[in-house]
Amino acid sequence: MPIVPMLIEAESVSREYRLGETVIRAVDAVSLSVEKGEFLALLGSSGSGKSTLLSMMAGLDRPTSGSIRVRERNLAELEANELARYRRETVGMVFQSFNLLPRMTLEENVELPLRLAEVDRHDRESRVGEALERVRLGARRRHRPSELSGGEQQRGALARALVNRPAILFADEPTGNLDSVNGEQILLLLREIQDSLGMTIIMVTHERPLAEKFANRIALLSDGRLVSDGAQR
Amino acid sequence: MKTRDLSELAARNLREAVLRNSLTTLGVAVGVASLVAMLSLGLGLQTLASQRLTRSGLFDAVFVTSQRNFRGPGQRGSADSAPKKESRSLDEDARQQLSKFSNVAEVYPQIRFVTDVRYAGKSETTSVLGLPDSSRSGGAFEGMTGAYFSSPTADEAILQIEFAKVLTDQPPSLVGKDLTLRYAERAALSKTADDDEALLDSMIGSGKPGGVSIVPREKTLRIVGVIESDPSAGIGGFGGARVYLPLKTAEQLHVAQPDDLQAFLSGNPAKPSYMALTVRVHSPKDVPQVEAAIKQLGFATFSLLDATKSLRLVFTVFDLFLGLFGSLALTVASLGIINTLVMAILERRREIGILKALGATDRDVRSLFFAEAGAMGLFGGLSGVALGWLIGQALTWGTTIYLHRQNLPGVKISYVPWWLALGAIGFAIIVSLVAGLYPAARAARLNPVEALRYE
């Protein structure tokens, strides 16, 4: 059996927060590996540490101890600028509350990562169009977020996460603010993207049925610890 | 992030909170306007004073007298002086020599004499002064009744108003009328002149050749103007005159001068000397060099250069204080910028988190806030300069109205040179950027996870 290289390797990762004299351990010595092309669901109840673990793997936060290696580079040791570059070039992110900038149109929101990555202006238009077509929002490009439904906003956020062609897509409760129909549509889109682009997807959710339906693998967290980690199909 | 993208994002952010950003920018504009108005007022007054003084001919002139016979103001007596070079006569040769100096615009003599003026049966004794054609541009003739001399050799006269009042109750009515001067003409006598020789020899008994005759003459002049101020006041005129003629006309009269006696006694009466010469230079800064060169020739000199230096010092201190007061308003405006940007950080905390999650570096975030602060400084600076200029114009306008009511000519009391405009805009940008330092650094330091959690 061939050895598949791991894309992400988290080893004994802990994250502590201090509240006065109290130390809160949000993530407690979690070790986890993710293969390229996997769709991993981090499942757990509220306060289980799943979003904190996702933030550290996405380069938004740093572990208090342990290491997170992505393509052999330890994120904990990267300088702030290198970490920003990792977020810009390797990672795409989707949030529960969409996080589209309300002052910008949909296409301006989607163009934002390309501006930050200093992509040539001529290439931007085609890449924005391509990303919006992929989430079936080509006709709504000139609309502001307030003029879109929740499902459309999340699809717009997904287009923004895809526009830089990242290797890993992190989704933090992407269906949390959506009804079940729109939630399923988003997850169908994620599966479609995973299949067509071979993208690695790591999703945080507390909805077990959705995780079981769409993810290849579920890792269960409770009180900051990894309770179980197993393949779905 | 590229500069163009940064500018576009900053412009978008400024447009979105248009009321608050406009008010902050207005605060900067008012600060810059007060600075510009204060300094333009100081510069305007300085320029006005300099122009008036320069046009008066006092600060670009060196007054030359012969050391042997006449001393200008400020000259000490010779008792405590070191041994001097042989003093020279201030004659036509000396005048020509001085004219050839570099940086000398013109050299003209002081032609002044006391005469009897006759008009409409009245006879008054007064002093007459020859004016060089360059005095036409002096401020003294602005607003005069009538006009300046039609030509440098015209048989015309301008009267000082006090003297005109002596001649008539209606001074303006004198313009176009004629008056007659009775004066003493000086004529040189030759030793070969048969009729004069014996007489002269017997008179002086010295056997020296030549002599002078003093002949009464009359000259009719057309009055072309009446002037209220005194163009000969101060050092150039050695006291006020009442009747003014074109200098060349005055020279052609060959009026007997006090130095004629000196020339006669020195044995060269055919070569008259001048009581004093005025050497005008191209610029006041040329005065020291020209003055030194004239002294080298053995003449006594006097200039008002030191007075100009004092004047500059006074105005520099004046401008400094005006600038300080103006800067206070700009300092208050910079607090407004800090306040606006700190508030913007609170409001845009989530946006900063999103930008960071999408890969923006601390530098990108800092630059964005800097660009917004700089833009407020730029627009505040531009509007402030315009506003400051308008305030200056309004002050000039108000002053001119007041002066006109006092029957005085209007003056420009505010002056905004290009360097003040550019400097004020630059200063506003720098102050705004400094004000943006703290908010920008604070925004850049935000933790993206905490920022994203912010509602």
Image: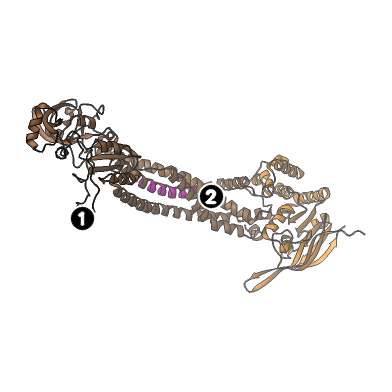
- Left or right of B61? Residue B452 is right
Q: Identity of the amino acid at label 1?
A: Asp
Q: Are discs 2 and 1 both within one chain? A: yes
Instruction: Residue under label 1, please give it.
Output: B80
In the rendered image, which quarter contains the C terminus of chain B? bottom right
> Could you say where residue B86 lies in the image, as x and y percent from the top left?
23, 46
- Left or right of B70? Residue A229 is right
- Left or right of B82? Residue B395 is right
Residue extent of the magenta highlight: B19-41
- Other residues around mark 2 within 10 Å, as few (<14) / some (14–19) / many (≥20): many
Q: Looking at the image, is mark 2 or mark 1 earlier in the sequence?
A: 1
**Chain A tint in image:** orange
Q: Secondary structure at mark 1?
A: loop
Front residue of B286/B27: it is: B286
Quadrant of res B177: top left
What is the letter of the brown chain? B
- Other residues around mark 1 within 10 Å, as few (<14) / some (14–19) / many (≥20): few
> Could you say where residue B291 lies in the image, as x and y percent from the top left?
30, 45
> Could you say where residue B326 lies in the image, as x and y percent from the top left?
40, 51
Instruction: Residue under label 2, please give it.
Output: B374
Front residue of B433/B179: it is: B179
Q: Identity of the amino acid at label 2?
A: Gly
